Amino acid sequence: MEETYTDSLDPEKLLQCPYDKNHQIRACRFPYHLIKCRKNHPDVASKLATCPFNARHQVPRAEISHHISSCDDRSCIEQDVVNQTRSLRQETLAESTWQCPPCDEDWDKDLWEQTSTPFVWGTTHYCDNNSPANNIVMEHKNNLASGMRVPKSLPYVLPWKNNGNTQ
């Protein structure tokens, strides 16, 4: 049995073409030959079906169900499916044991402890009535040198705000 298996893997082994019985093709060239010969013999190709487990197997349509149930390559494919299913189950198990680490952050507490007001472009004071910071006495601090002021607009013009100027 092992000798037959080794023999089927031999790239120099001659295989008979299912489209033209006179063609003897080396195993390493067989897939390419099948494509070429299928185009050259469409009448024979219409009578043959391709095995779902090995595209090199061209079987008469009437015999395809029998071939599928007895194909040697079927066991290889089925074993691959079993192995993939097992590895998928193991990966799923590994993921399900993960736990979120504890978090020491408390954003609500940080908000109530906030002593400065948030930066809002173009305003000198910001204090929302719903903000916890509204109980804090607000002082306007200007860190600019004397004679300097905050710009009244952005340093660039947005394309959708071109102030009616068309280019």
Image: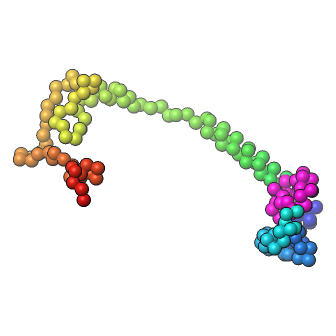
Q: In the figure, is residue 21 to the left or right of 141?
A: right
Q: What range is drawn magenta here?
A: 48-74
Q: Quadrant of residue 3?
A: bottom right
Question: Residue visible at 85% across and 52% down?
Answer: 75
Task: Choose top left, top right, bottom left or bottom right for residue 149.
Answer: top left
Residue at position x 65%, y 40% from top? Answer: 92
Q: In which quadrant will I find the C terminus?
A: bottom left
Q: Is residue 66 magenta?
A: yes
Q: Is residue 9 visible?
A: no
Quarter of the image for the N terminus: give it. Answer: bottom right
Q: Which residue in the rendered view is the most extreme toward the left?
A: 147
Residue extending furthest toward the top = 135
Where residue 68 sits: x, y (%)? Answer: 88, 53
Does the magenta segment cover residue 55? yes
Q: Is residue 88 above or below residue 33?
A: above
| Nearer to the camera, 112 or 118 | 118
Horizontal side of residue 16 vs 101, given as left or right: right
Could you tell whether 91 is left or right of 23 in the image? Answer: left
Considering only vertical position in the picture, is 122 above or below 78?
above
Between residue 11 and residue 167, name the one nearer to us.
167
Residue 28 on image: x %, y %: 80, 72
Residue 145: % across, % down: 9, 46
Is the image coloured rainbow, by chain, by secondary structure, or in one colour? rainbow
